[in-house]
Image: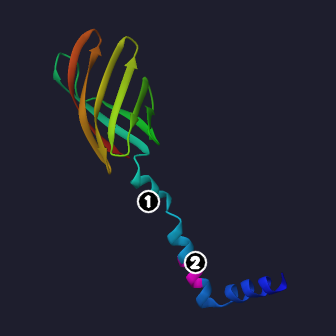
Amino acid sequence: MAHFSRSILSVVTRPRHLALLAVLAAAAVPSTADARIAGYDGVWNVTFATTRGVCSSGYSVPFTVTGSRVSSAGGGRVSGTVNRGGAVAVQVSVGASHASGGGRLGGAAGAGSWRGVISGDQCSGTWQATRS
């Protein structure tokens, strides 16, 4: 036991070895930013455009992605999934209005299409997303 303690102490007290240990430890553990960029976690601001129907267009809604799950970041009921490749499928409902959509997220942006019944009108369109 005494030999083990002395050998660890000699490694730690040598500045060159200490620097090497610090570099190896930093390289072995990805930073939070790297982990977030590698996945899709975070708040995504999604802007909707209507291409068919008389539903309003240009409104923005925040969604939260945690792991493979998509949920609401404020208002309405949102459920969905995103896979490792960025393919996303989402269902949204607010009162009697409901819509579903799909598309792809990548890096800090995404895009896709949606369709649903909004305030009694059948509509469809596209969406664009940016990660904040």
Residue type at mark 2: give it. Answer: Ala
Give the left or right position of residue 53, taking residue 39 as reference: left
Bounds of the magenta segment: 19-23
Residue 42 image position (x, y, % from top left) = 43, 45
Most foreground residue, 9 or 59: 9
Q: Is residue 129 magenta?
A: no
Q: Residue at x 74, y 87 (%)?
A: 7
Disc 1 to disc 2: CB gap under 8 Å: no
**According to the image, what is the colour scheme of the structure?**
rainbow
Give the residue pinned by disc 2. 22
- Outermost residue, right side: 2
Q: Residue at x 49, y 63 (%)?
A: 30
Distance (Cα) linking label 1 and label 2: 18 Å
Circle number at residue 34: 1
Most frequent secondary structure within the magenta stretch? helix
Quarter of the view holding residue 102: top left
Q: Is residue 50 above or below residue 8?
A: above
Give the left or right position of residue 120, taking residue 10 as reference: left
Residue type at mark 1: give it. Answer: Asp
Quarter of the view holding residue 113: top left
Name the quarter where the N terminus is drawn: bottom right
Residue 71 image position (x, y, % from top left) = 45, 32
Quarter of the view holding residue 51: top left
Circle number at residue 113: none
Q: Is residue 75 above or below residue 17?
A: above
Which structural element holds mark 1?
A: helix
Which structural element holds mark 2?
A: helix
Residue 96 image position (x, y, % from top left) = 37, 11
Most foreground residue, 51 or 59: 51
Q: Is residue 20 magenta?
A: yes
